[in-house]
Amino acid sequence: MFIFLKGRLYYLAVSASLSLMICRFQFHPAAIAATILFLFFLYYRRQHFLLFLSFLTVIFFIFVFFFTENQNKTGLSEGPFSGKGIFSSIPYSDGNQLRGYSETSHGEKLVFTYTIKSLKEKQALNRINPGMVCSFTAALPASYPSLL
């Protein structure tokens, strides 16, 4: 099968990228139009086998996206909450922003962003290592509206 696609596999990569763009932007008309234009381009070039594979690629990636999004559940509710967490990696500091990963005492993995208020606080936060425990008060933002 790949003999027939020699030099054309990038069309399938474009199909996969377009399907992920459709999912990421929640079926925005521009993303759908770009995908349809690409499929019409393949039809116009009389690449029917490639058109079929590209269409299957788009459908497959949309299905995989919905499946993984459906499996992604949290035990936390939207809004403010408090707890204890363990740093799972060294946080990344960029200017007055601190970003990293933490795990709650219930095993929930969190991605956090913190605004550093002073140089003294930044120096203290630069000493964070994986495995350190912290207490936090945070707010879980509202999730994207469900597509299902």
Image: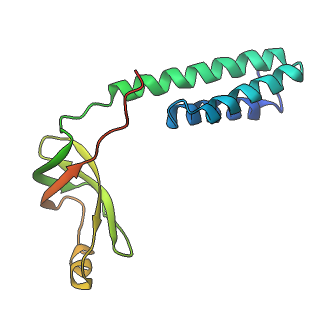
Camera sees residue 69: yes
- The quarter of the rendered structure image containing the N terminus is top right
Q: Position of residue 3 (x, y in %)?
A: 82, 22
Instruction: Pick the residue in front: 46 or 127.
Output: 46
- The quarter of the rendered structure image containing the C terminus is top left
Q: Position of residue 43 (x, y in %)?
A: 83, 19
* Residue at image point 89% right, 18% down: 46
Query: On the picture, is 57 further left or further right than 103?
Result: right
Instruction: Pick the residue in front: 37 or 50.
Output: 37
Instruction: Pick the residue in front: 118 or 145.
Output: 145
* Residue at image point 27% right, 64% down: 114
* Residue at image point 59% right, 19% down: 59
* Residue at image point 56% right, 25% down: 61
Q: Position of residue 57 (x, y in %)?
A: 64, 22
Query: On the picture, is 74 further left or further right than 35?
Result: left
Query: On the picture, is 93 further left or further right than 108?
Result: right
Reply above or below: 91 against 45. Answer: below
Dividing the picture into quarters, in which one does residue 39 lie? Answer: top right
Camera sees residue 3: no
Q: Residue furthest bottom?
A: 120
Query: On the picture, is 44 further left or further right than 98?
Result: right
Reply above or below: 88 against 22. Answer: below
Instruction: Pick the residue in front: 114 or 78.
Output: 78
Q: Position of residue 84 (x, y in %)?
A: 11, 53
Q: Residue furthest right?
A: 45
Q: Residue furthest front?
A: 29
The way the protein has been coloured in the rendering is rainbow
Reply above or below: 72 against 123. Answer: above
